[in-house]
Image (spheres, rainbow, N blue to C red):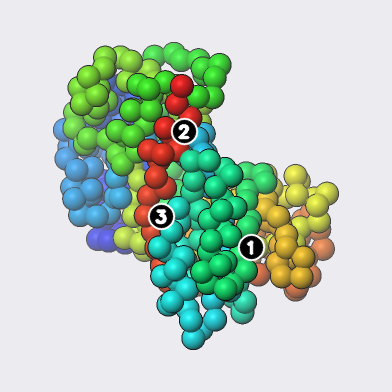
Amino acid sequence: MSTAAGLGRVDTAIINAYQGGFPVVERPFEPAAEALRERGIDVSAAELLERVQQLDEEGVLTRFGALINAQEIGGAATLVAMHAPEERFDEIAAQVNDHREVAHNYERAHPHLNMWFVVSVADPDEVDCVLRDTEAETGQETYNLPKEQEFRVEAKFLLDGPISDGDVDRSELGPDVEPAERETLTPDERDLVLEIQDGLPISETPYADVAAELGVDTEWAIRTIKRFNAEEKVRRVGVIPNHYELGYTENGMTVWNVPDEKVDEVGPEVAALGFVTHCYQRPRHDGVWPYNFFAMTHGRSEAESEQRVQRVKETMEEHWDVGDDDWDTLFSTQILKKTGIRMDERADANTE
């Protein structure tokens, strides 16, 4: 069976199985391959390693390794919306993107708020400074939409084929760990975060290779990465696919004016929909932005995307009477900027 990006059965199984739950042990490809064989995928540890290397080289993966949860590392990030008039759109995009604190910037289809960007800072107080400067430079008002409650952040992109439920999990392997009773990082932990943020080496012993690079003990690196996973500093360990290469080209940000008393009911229900990758409560802005609930969906076609948005709507309707003016879907029409979130500065600010 082939899938998007011309992937065969084994590659599809790897991508479905290990977008999380990869073993954190000295030689992780051995138990990872064993788990695949238990699911009917005949692959050795060496073959699994080779396939992950090839998928990475071909750009099907953005990287292999730990997905860092920047919020738990330090600093702050917020989502910001603004209006960029058509005749000044490129000028304003350049002015916004020129701020090093702006990590991502997207054009989205909306009659007024058509520019959406993420501001990432080491000091939460810096957000207001960035927004004041942006307003002064562009002459446009910004609308800050910080996360008030997170219900789901799990951007997994599954394919048709073997292990399409994506439920392989070997994260229980390795040493037993307990969360640390502190929120700050030690200098060694900070160095580890920065070393693994862009991925692990794709080798037989990725954690040992990281330890050697840092000059620390392999067992310490393994225990710390596993503890980070337990503390949610690491969201998951595994393959991180390029969703565009997998055919997930439709990106819809659904927004909802959920009655405040219903948010805690609706949030977990919408988050339980497997195709919802991000799900948050955010503030409204009177007279401009009436929505307080965001759910991001991705699809491989316009039809699939519309079906998934409809599923979200049906879930909402189980809890409250959804009117036509109570929701919208903002599709991404252009990536204006997409860079890292300056993890070094955020980690430094939270290091003992």
The residue type indicated by label 3 comes to: Arg
Q: Does label 2 or label 3 sit earlier along the sequence?
A: 3
Q: Nearer the viewer, mark 1 or mark 2?
A: 2
Point out residue 352 in the picture as x, y percentages from the top left corner. Answer: 46, 21
Q: Does label 1 or label 2 sit earlier along the sequence?
A: 1
Q: Nearer the viewer, residue 92 or 244?
A: 92
Residue 143 badge = 1
Disc 1 from disc 3: Cα separation: 19 Å
Report the residue at 62% width, 44% height from top: 150
Quadrant for residue 64, please give it.
top left
Residue placed under numbered mark 3 in the picture: 100
Crowdedness near tag 1: few (<14), some (14–19) or many (≥20) residues, C-alpha within 10 Å: some
Position of residue 256 in the picture relative to residue 118 (left or right): right
Residue placed under numbered mark 2 in the picture: 349
Point out residue 75 in the picture as x, y percentages from the top left corner. Answer: 51, 39
Q: Nearer the viewer, residue 38 or 345?
A: 345
Quadrant for residue 125, please give it.
top right
Q: Does label 1 or label 3 sit earlier along the sequence?
A: 3
The residue type indicated by label 2 comes to: Ala
Position of residue 17 in the picture relative to residue 130 (left or right): left
Q: How many marks?
A: 3
Q: Nearer the viewer, mark 1 or mark 3?
A: 3
